[in-house]
Amino acid sequence: MLHLIATSNQLAQLLAASRRQAGFTQAEAASRIGVSQSRISALETDASALTLTQLLALCGAYGLQLQVSDKHQPVPEPAPGVEW
């Protein structure tokens, strides 16, 4: 599913939902990326202090793929079987 994120609050909500969908507690997610449980809690409330390294690690842990596109161009469909 494609999620369009425009605010840090939207990212925080997506991270919390994705963690739950992946079946992780905050403590388990924290352990996977090397931060404290309280850091995961804080990021799920306000993702404005999220580092790129943490975002990529969380995406990997939750089975998400980060994609950036020009908002003025239509989003192309990825080719089948192509992954980065």
Image: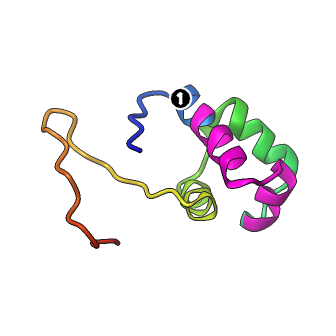
Residue 45 in percent (x, y) is at 71, 30
Q: In this view, does 50 lie above or below 54?
A: above
Q: Which of 22 and 16 is in front in this view?
A: 22
Q: What stretch is highlighted in magenta?
A: 13-32
Does the segment drawn in magenta span residue 15? yes
Q: Which amino acid does label 1 sit on?
A: Gln
Q: Along the horizontal axis of the image, is 51 left or right of 23?
A: left
Q: Nearer the viewer, residue 79 or 37?
A: 79
Residue 2 figure quarter: top left
Q: Along the horizontal axis of the image, is 14 left or right of 28?
A: left
Q: Nearer the viewer, residue 19 or 36?
A: 19
Q: How many marks?
A: 1
Residue visible at 82% across and 64% down in the picture: 31
Q: In which quarter of the image is the C terminus?
A: bottom left
Residue visible at 43% across and 34% down in the picture: 5
Q: Residue farthest to the left?
A: 73
Q: Residue farthest to the front?
A: 80
Does the segment drawn in magenta span residue 78? no
Residue visible at 28% across and 73% down in the picture: 81
The secondary element bearing badge 1 is classed as helix
Residue 77 in percent (x, y) is at 20, 52
Residue visible at 12% across and 38% down in the picture: 73
Residue to which mark 1 is pinned: 10
Q: Main secondary structure of the magenta part?
A: helix
What colouring style does the render use? rainbow
Residue 58 in percent (x, y) is at 62, 57
Residue 34 in percent (x, y) is at 77, 65
Q: In which quarter of the image is the N terminus?
A: top left
Q: Is residue 9 above or below residue 58?
A: above
